[in-house]
């Protein structure tokens, strides 16, 4: 059951939605609109040491090991 992040093109609300079935219609939680844009969400994985794992190609910000740190593009 994936969780998708959407932005409503009508009211600007950004929200997450747990998708239970492939036939489920996504609607804005604020205005109930269906004019939605699916956003690309950063993926964080917690390793056995409890720290975040970033691949060697960079992270969601393009800077290695930047996801999960306060003040970066992924924290907000």
Image (cartoon, helix red, strand yellow):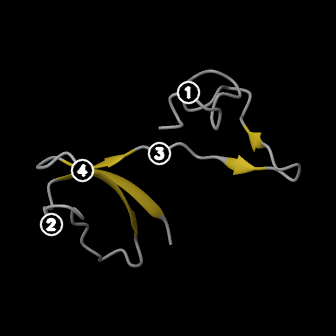
Instruction: Work out whether residue 47 or residue 76 is closer to the camera in this orientation and state it.
Output: 76
The quadrant where residue 52 appears:
top right
Instruction: Name above or below for residue 27 compared with residue 46.
Output: below
Secondary structure found at label 1: loop
Marks 1,2: beta carbons within 8 A:
no
CA gap between label 2 and label 3 equals 22 Å
Secondary structure found at label 2: loop
Apparent side of residue 16 relative to residue 59 in the rendered image (left or right): left
Give neighbour class at mark 2: few <14, some 14-19, many 20+ (Cα, 10 Å): few
Q: Which residue is mark 1?
A: 72
Secondary structure found at label 3: loop
Please report the residue visible at 47 percent of the width from the left and 45 percent of the height from the top: 41
Please report the residue visible at 88 percent of the width from the left and 49 percent of the height from the top: 49
Give neighbour class at mark 1: few <14, some 14-19, many 20+ (Cα, 10 Å): few
Secondary structure found at label 4: loop
Q: Position of residue 24 (x, y in %)?
A: 29, 76
Q: Which mark is residue 41?
A: 3
Q: Position of residue 44 (x, y in %)?
A: 64, 46
């Amino acid at each position: 059951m994936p969780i998708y992040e959407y932005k409503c093109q009508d009211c600007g609300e950004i929200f997450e939605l747990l998708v239970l079935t492939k036939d489920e219609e996504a609607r804005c939680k604020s205005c109930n609109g269906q004019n939605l844009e699916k956003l690309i969400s950063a993926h964080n994985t917690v390793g056995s040491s409890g720290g975040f794992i970033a691949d060697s190609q960079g992270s969601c910000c393009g800077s290695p090991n930047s996801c999960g740190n306060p003040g970066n593009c992924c924290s907000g």
